[in-house]
Image (spheres, rainbow, N blue to C red):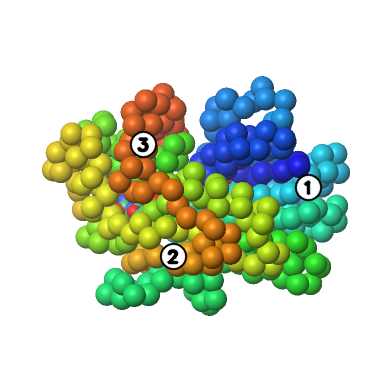
Amino acid sequence: MKILVTGGAGFIGSNFIFYMLKEHPEDSIICLDALTYAGNLSTLKPVLDDPRFRFVKADICDREKVYDLFESEKPDYVVHFAAESHVDRSIDDPGIFVKTNVLGTQVLIDACVKYGIKRFHHVSTDEVYGDLPLDRPDMFFVETLPLKASSPYSASKASSDLLVMSYHRTFGLDATLSRCSNNYGPYQFPEKMIPLMIANAMADKPLPVYGEGINVRDWLYVEDHCRAIDLILRKGRSGEVYNIGGHNEMRNIDIVKLICAELGKPESLITFVKDRKGHDMRYAIDPAKIHNELGWLPQTMFRDGIKKTIRWYLDNRSWWEEIVNGDYKEYYQKMYGNR
Ligand code: NAD
Ligand code: TYD
């Protein structure tokens, strides 16, 4: 089958492309990506010469280009990762989140309806459910919860979720949707917590923990996410939402301490800084549906995944050093300079 992957030059999209080309030699992939600050063509270097792969630089908001691509390539499946994905940036400048995540998604699903495809898979996030209290470990996100987004990022993702499901009902679009917990692993842009802390610790720079560091996230190794999407794409039921997560809840401060220990760096690098506005307290996925229906379970536990991830950043310094020495410097100064 021919799969159009949007946002494939980013963190999860690139890992998904590698996963699919390895697991399904019979498939071909077209990657559509605008190469924003978060997209990196060099990440895709290992597959750029693969005859089963083609890269197209385009913005998902560009209707004409998107329609041209559908007309010429006639993809069977679309897996939609392309998005503005960082909560802190959405607090700083919400507009681009609405444009890319909502309007861009609309262009794509319009194209899917117009040209006809077998399935559109929308990659969403558990953040659309809002957050859970720290003192209720018995509570989890289930697919039937109402959406209650806290940040402009999660609100834009929730809007796109609703739009996709409305196209399923109104226009008969074959669509599946997944809401995953926080991912970590190779090729994650160093603005996100885990790679930011690894990169700073390696350079003996302060480790900026927001608030008291007691916020909890449910971490999933990126390859487990990719496997779940592949399963939903092939075997999931149209019109259904699947939560993806693996009961790997961790407090931020404990992760940062773990990174210090793994890298042999002192905890004195940890600096508590002003909290994020509207900071969600706890995310925790109930993955019963995807487990019961599709047999999915995470294969990488956090203690192993974090070691593999740190090893990857140690072995691939040039990948992230190029980023942190570029425009990222300005971003870092703006976000952390007076925090
Ligand atoms: P990322 O920021 O690393 O990558 C986003 C990619 O999308 C980049 O390659 C970028 O160039 C591209 N892009 C952005 N705007 C575009 C546009 N207008 N047109 C075409 N391409 C564009 O993001 P990520 O962490 O890989 O997340 C991918 C998807 O997974 C997002 O939809 C995100 O909401 C979702 N998600 C992420 C996580 C996580 O922990 N990172 C968890 C759950 C869900
Ligand atoms: P992040 O990786 O931005 O993911 P999300 O906000 O989508 O969950 O942040 C993960 C957690 O780490 C979140 O609670 C905010 C916190 N955090 C810090 O404490 N310091 C930082 O510099 C960053 C980027 C995040």
Q: Residue at x 47, y 55 (%)?
A: 297
Q: Nearer the viewer, residue 23 or 330?
A: 23
Give the residue number, with chain letter if any, for mark 3. 308
User: What is the distance, in whole Å, between disc 1 and disc 2 at their CAs?
Assistant: 30 Å
- On residue 76, which mark appears? 1
Q: Give, as a three-letter code, the residue at label 1.
A: Asp
Q: Residues within 10 Å of mark 1 (few under 14, many from 20)?
A: some
User: What is the distance, in whole Å, between disc 2 and disc 3 at their CAs?
Assistant: 23 Å
User: Does residue 332 sit above or below 181 in this rendering?
Assistant: above
Give the residue number, with chain letter if any, for mark 2. 285
Query: What SS does tag 3 mark?
Result: helix
User: Does residue 120 sit above or below 56 in this rendering?
Assistant: below
In the rendered structure, which disc, 1 or 2, sits on the residue that comes first in sequence? 1
In the rendered structure, which disc, 2 or 3, sits on the residue that comes first in sequence? 2
Query: What SS does tag 2 mark?
Result: loop
Residue 307 position in % (x across, y down): 31, 38
Query: What SS does tag 1 mark?
Result: loop
Q: Is residue 173 left or right of residue 103?
A: right
